Image: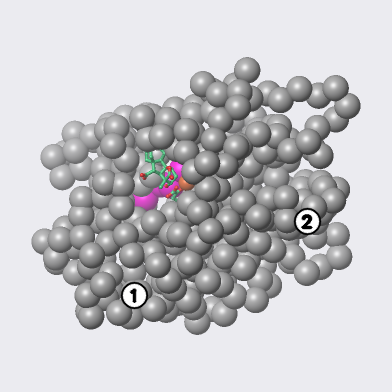
Amino acid sequence: MVVLTNPTLEQIPLVRSPKHGAYFGGIPAIDLSAPGAAEAVVKACEDFGFFKVVDHGVPMELMRRLEAEAVKFFAMPQADKEKSGPANPFGYGSKRIGPNGDIGWVEYLLFAVTSDPLSHTSMAFLEEPSASSLRSALSDYLRALKKLAVQVLELMAEGLKIEARDAFSKLVMDEQSDGIFRLNHYPKFPLLERLNCSLTGFGEHTDPQIISILRSNNSTGLQIALKDGSWVSVPSDQASFYINVGDSLQVLTNGRFRSVKHRVLANGIKSRVSMIYFLGAAAAEKIAPLAEVMGEGEQSKYKEFTWGEYKKAAYTTRLSDNRLGQFEK
Ligand SMILES: C=C1C[C@]23C[C@@]1(O)CC[C@H]2[C@@]12CC[C@H](O)[C@@](C)(C(=O)O1)[C@H]2[C@@H]3C(=O)O
Ligand SMILES: O=C(O)CCC(=O)C(=O)O
Ligand SMILES: [Fe+2]
């Protein structure tokens, strides 16, 4: 890997290798209402920690409306966008990701999401009349995605033969559940075409929460790491959602589900706009393997911790750090 020292790009790592890698055809595409969906979800979480949800019933109009609002926001003059920043942790951010020195070719808006999607007022600008269309698009989108999250989490429980269908979903339905919503914009960087490489948009990491639900415009860039450590490119599909297993779900399943390592590469051809809903438990919730997923005599692979403790520790780490490492037994 080389690093560009152009002052505009500061120190953002360039990824040389094949431009976007080969597009991976093996990502499971699951229709949640099809027979065998629960088993397919479990297999996808074990094999990849990642899958695509098709025919999900979320109106395309909701997705397009929010995307259009994001595009409108990111097209504003830099000084106006910065009125909503810096992201500490919520608000507008550009190039700097998190508090510990990570950088990428990305600008973003981060919102806190409480159990009532309407009260996601973590930023003063959302209260302004000029933001009313973004606020309303966000509320409608989050409400629909919360339902989708519950459906996915219930299928996971069913597929794992856990009697309580809400074993996972109740964690995100809790009044105090801790969600985050993120709008990312990776501007295209035409010089990359000539250099024959990509630029790190969002460096490799796992998501700390239970699951994340990702939707992007028809632009590529997302890559996931397979079990053997190789990176593969995820084909873009603006009509579908991608589900990431997060660190918390890996622990809840005692490592049976895999928290997927992923990253985003920016390119010279098309800007990428993604929207990601990260669903976390309540701060006081214990994150420990469910008794029902443990085989006879199986021990937990992790020390006991609450979501609040994990999150606090996560914010002291760099993106690519192995956050679960310090909680492993
Ligand atoms: C470098 C960081 C950014 C992050 C907080 C952290 O210290 C480590 C985890 C990062 C991450 C990855 C998934 C989500 O994008 C995110 C919002 C989250 O919950 O954990 C980010 C954090 C962030 O950008 O603030
Ligand atoms: O923007 C994307 O497509 C993914 C970004 C991501 O992984 C994140 O924000 O945690
Ligand atoms: Fe992520």
Image quarter hosting the N terminus: top left
Q: Amino acid at mark 1?
A: Leu
Give the camera-side residue of 328 and 163. Answer: 163
Which region of the structure is painted magenta? Answer: 262-266
Q: Is residue 69 above or below residue 319?
A: below
Name the residue: 58% across, 33% down.
Answer: 230
Viewed as shown, does residue 311 lie left or right of 155? Answer: left
State the SS at label 2: loop
Does the residue at mark 1 contact the one at mark 2 (Cβ under 8 Å)? no
Name the residue: 48% across, 76% down.
Answer: 140
Give the camera-side residue of 109 and 184. Answer: 109
- Dividing the picture into quadrants, the one containing residue 98 is top left
Percent from the top left, x then y, of residue 207?
Answer: 50, 42
**Residue 264 included in the magenta stretch of the image:** yes
**Mark 2 CB near ligand 1 (8 Å cut):** no
Percent from the top left, x then y, of residue 12?
Answer: 27, 38
Instruction: Name the chief secondary structure element in magenta.
Output: strand
Give the camera-side residue of 54 and 309. Answer: 309
Mark 2, residue position: 165
Percent from the top left, x then y, of residue 84?
Answer: 20, 60
Give the camera-side residue of 25 and 292. Answer: 292
Q: Residues within 10 Å of mark 2 (few under 14, many from 20)?
A: some
Mark 1, residue position: 134
Q: Counting residues from the N terminus, which is met first, the one under dot 1 or under dot 2?
A: 1
Q: Is residue 218 visible?
A: no
Percent from the top left, x then y, of residue 165?
Answer: 78, 56
Name the residue: 37% across, 35% down.
Answer: 315
Q: Is residue 74 visible?
A: yes
